[in-house]
Amino acid sequence: MVTRRKVIKSVVLSAFAGISAKFMDNIDSHQNMVNIKFEPGYLSLHRSGELWKRGEMLWAMMEKCELCPRRCGVNKLKGQKGFCNADSRLEISAYHPHFGEEHPLVGKGGSGTIFMTNCNLRCVFCINWEISQGGEGSVRSISEFADMMLSLQKMGCPNINIVTPTHYSPHILLALDKAAANGLKLPLVYNTSGWERIEILKILDGVVDIYLPDFKYSDPEMAEKYSSGAYSYPEVTANALLEMHRQVGVAKPAANGLMYRGLMIRHLVMPNNVSGTKKVIDWIAENLPKDTYLNIMSQYRPVYKASQYPEINRRITRQEYQEAVEYARKAGLTNLEIQGYYW
Ligand code: SF4
């Protein structure tokens, strides 16, 4: 998946609508202070023992790995590696507060980002290719992973943001359970390519507070060409977005400007309409509420293997970006994040 370290932000603010998380905000108008009381969904699953159980269920699936739509069937528990280049050992590249994510995820402390090594999609234009495809990172234990979450919380980050989580979903749930036992109480952000199996997402129901998926392509042939044969990407991702929305609903910031729950979709506009932007927007407008959060991203740049494909070997033009934004507005989408490049 494409992750972004440098994103220019502007945000539409409105009221927050939670579904099952325990959430309440109080505004003290005298002191102009906002107190938010929030409990992430995974805490109750931790208390009941369900979170650990689901983590073990996902762990067992690595025996014949079908954690993602590649469905390689390799035995990761015996050290075999599938298309993602991961076996059962957890590999992490970095963790730190990240100030380049969407504004309602950043707050004052920066989004508590943890970059997972390896990837199941392997796009030719990946901005983080050293991590996703170059093997940058080191083996970490579940306990170390849990400690990273807790130290990000101590640093003042408003959420835990797992970048490229799909192939490590078992490790995430087990680490989350350990961290929850030691006081973690931040919302969990699942920062994914969007190419997710419904069966796995159902196991994550109640665990993830904020889904942050890409919707990269509307044309399967583009997905096949630039994302390692992932012809099913548009169809699988569309279904995944419906399931994510069912679980967490529309994403809108709370009174303090931070996001606690919801579906936040990212769409990276690519040169020469490779990303099929208009069809992506049409699908969102027709299948999800009009106030679905959509970040229309302008920061595509030709890195990694993009120079081998002349049609994507340049940045987008201002006109390409403006057309995307105007089209989204005309489609009736109201919860748009529009980047500085538009103006
Ligand atoms: S997570 Fe990796 S090994 Fe498992 S199905 Fe996906 S690509 Fe294959």
Image (tube, helix red, strand yellow):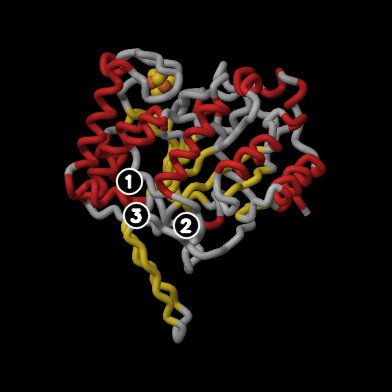
Local crowd size for mark 2, using a 10 Å CA cut-off: few (<14), some (14–19), many (≥20):
many
x%, y% of residue 338?
Answer: 67, 52
x%, y% of residue 109?
Answer: 46, 59
| Residue 170, quarter of picture | top left
Q: CA distance from mark 3 to mark 1?
A: 8 Å
Q: Amino acid at mark 2?
A: Met
Whichever of labels 2 and 1 marks the residue nearer the N terminus, that label is: 1
291, 147: nearer the viewer: 291
Q: Is residue 23 above or below residue 189?
A: below
Q: Which residue is mark 2?
A: 259
Q: Is residue 159 above or below residue 54?
A: below
Total numbered labels: 3
Q: Is residue 318 above or below residue 301?
A: below
| Left or right: 231 in relation to 67 | right
x%, y% of residue 319?
Answer: 82, 43
Does dot 1 land on a helix, a strand or a loop?
loop
Q: Which residue is mark 1?
A: 206
Contact, CB < 8 Å: mark 3 with mark 1? yes
Look at 59% across and 29% down and name the residue there: 126
Which residue is the extreme one toward the left? Answer: 48
**Residue 20 circle label:** 3
309, 46: nearer the viewer: 46
Q: Amino acid at mark 1?
A: Gly
